Image (cartoon, coloured by chain):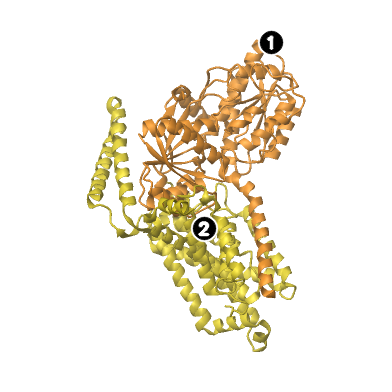
Chain colours: A orange, B yellow
Amino acid sequence: MRKTINIASFFALATSIVLGAYGCKDSGASGSTAGTTGTTGSNSTAGGETAGSGGTTGSGRKDPAKDGSDIGEPIKIGLVASQNGDLKPWGDDCVKGANMAVDEINAAGGINGKKVLLLTEDSNSDPVAGKNAASKLVTDGCVGILGEVASGITQQMANVAFDAGLPIVAVGATRTDISDIGSNFFRVCYTDDFQGPVMAKFAYDYLSLRNVAIMTDNKQPYSVGLSDSFRKAFEGYGGKIVDEQKYQSKETQFSSYISNMKSKSPDGVFLSGYFTEVGPIVSQMRAAGLNMPVLGGDGWDSAQLQTSGGQAIVGGFFCNHYNNEEKRPEVQKFLADWKAKYSGVPGTTMGALGYDAAKLLCDAIKRAMDKGGKKSKDISAALEDTSDFAGVSGKVTLKGMKGNPAKRALVVKVTANGTTFEKAYEPEELAK
Amino acid sequence: MLHDTLNLVAGLDFSILPQQLVNGLLLGSVYALIALGYTMVYGVLRLINFAHGEVFMLGSYAALFTSWSLGFSPEALAGQDKPSSWINLVLMLVVSMVVCGLIGMAIEFLAYRPMRNQPRIASLITAIGVSLFIQYAGGLFLPQSPPPAISEQVNPYRNEKVTVTLAPPPQDLVVQAKDARAKADQMDKAYEAAKAKGDPTSLESMRQETQAAKNAASNLETQVASKSTGLTVPYGQLGMLLTTLVLMALLWFIVQKTKTGRAMRAVAHDFDSAALMGVNVGRIITITFVIGSALAGAGAMMYATVLRTPLTPFLGVTPGVKAFVAAVLGGIGNIPGAVLGGILMGIVETLVVWLDGVVPGLSGYKDAVAFVVLIAVLLFRPGGLLGSSKVEKV
């Protein structure tokens, strides 16, 4: 009997410790798979908690209590980017894009004769470091802040900016609820709420799919939310969701889910998770004899998608902000400038979005100054007033949008060593 | 009540049950392979080697680096097709096993040997320390962002599978599917050619027709796949199962038929008496660690190559916990028990996912159900399925 007790207590202790270790590393590891879609970091500090805010204005969001910094000379704007850590590839492109935009503006004489100075701080892909970086930029006297590429970090920065009364233009933070923080928050990317309808329309109209199965990563709020918005939109178009299988991050053997799904005979599969699981799922699907089209969200966006998905993932479709192969003149000009400045092409979508964010902020500063504005508050108002700003990644309209632009989204097709542009959807096309 | 139960049963799709059982067996065989390492070490040392999952993780990285040095790194491939052969797979397997064996030996020598005469709890805490140390040291030195995966091209059998048909699909459907696929491929080629030429007028309608043909083909193929009751096992997974069985047989041979094996059993039976009888206990313990870790290495290589999960330094945690539970379920210290426990865990997990068809949301609880089974077994058989208070260990 003693032996039994030993085994049982060993077991209890062991499991609790091992599971504890598992739990705490989970938050760290999610960053590596999060890419630009932003589950990185905590979501504990909601913006509404910040005290001392003034009343709400026409924007329908809370206004910061402070008016922010003065527009001086040179005009200082701040950028927080993940120049180290998990998000480095995205952060580096973002810095390059923003620098390119500011250099262009200065080469053309600055804003109303005043030079623009871009101060860059590293967030190390970490929400707390991102928060400190934003505070430093506030102390340095920036009139507005750009960044970040992931939602968790952006949220922390947005709180700092709200307290200081500075406008913040997020680059790649797609989580929908961040914009509730206050009337100083804006972004140049679409939100997660938009990706689902885009892919639903693409599946229904373009691929003529009618009976789609969904695979959801039950552990990632991003995936659960995306699956829901896809389901709603797809059923709205008249399609049918024949099955939903829910797996969990870090699983590796998906054959049981695939067998379940196979018996429902779907004609397409929507995989809303990250590429780390999507790759193995799709290759195991193909091995089980399922050859239907597969689609997903920007959680697929990684250079590792093809290594984890192999030949099977080639031909799959996902939603993205921007693609180097688009033929629009804005994109061609951007690519030519990029090549002249840095050589090559941007490796991630954040090059274009970083560029757009910096251009948008400078454009708003100019509009604010033209109206006689002198403070950060006036820049926020000008940003709120933005309509049809022509960005590389598409037109940005922020007027009456609570900081979330209605923006075009691209559907890209996975090739053996990258992606190719397949179709673009303007927001008007997704009226529902 | 009875009516509800009948309804539930009626909702189940029994045509996929055989496939699900095979899925469970395949999943369980990897658990079993890792569980063997836990159980062997526990058998001789009464120590739960929590670093075993980390040895598994390092084994998968060893396989990754081997595949890279064989010319299957993303940079070397750059989207190109590269032929592979089974020799590469064997090489990766051997390297993984050797590396893991050495790491197991090092862990034993550096961390556990100094603790051998201390209270058992000291070794246990050391084991947890080693586990965390390897995870976080791995985080500093191993490529993990973005998480790398072993290229599928290293596996020459990736597109082949064994199909056992229990109830064949309608033959005309098979023919239809084949024809539809041929037609779709043809249309796709024509479309791509037209697209390359840049003939915009008819391009969109052509694309729609091609897409329709592709959808028709994949629909027919899905019907063929779902109308036949049978088993599909990709070669890779079959290879995993066979390798596991061969390694288990080899282990059984070593333990039961060789002098070293006899010494291992003697140490497991009674540590001090074995030493008195002239068994070199230190050496036997080292060998046990080497064998157990090498088995984890084999499991890791197959896991990373066949299932192609992207690698992170925390990769070993989940399989480690599962395999540990499997070892306890089967009766820790008992070799056939570890195999039985592993396979049982695999099958239980898979069946929970299967039952998700009638109880939506159940699949989210599959790990919990595995633990419930464990608790149930331990309530009635505290030593595990094949264990007892007086088992013959290892």
Q: Chain of mark 2?
A: B
- Which kind of residue does numbered mark 1 sit on? Gly
Numbered badge on residue A372: 1
Near mark 2 (Cα within 10 A), the count class, few <14, some 14-19 or many ≥20, is some
For label 2, the residue is: B65
Q: Quadrant of residue B214?
A: top left
Q: Is residue B393 above or below residue A266?
A: below
Secondary structure, mark 2, is helix
Seen from the viewer's position, the closer of residues B278 and B381 is B381
Q: Is residue B54 above or below residue B41?
A: above
Near mark 1 (Cα within 10 A), the count class, few <14, some 14-19 or many ≥20, is few
- Which kind of residue does numbered mark 2 sit on? Phe
Q: Position of residue A172 (x, y in %)?
A: 57, 33
- Report if residue A28 is visible in the image: yes
Disc 2 vs disc 1: Cβ atoms closer than 8 Å? no
Q: Position of residue B375 (x, y in %)?
A: 60, 63
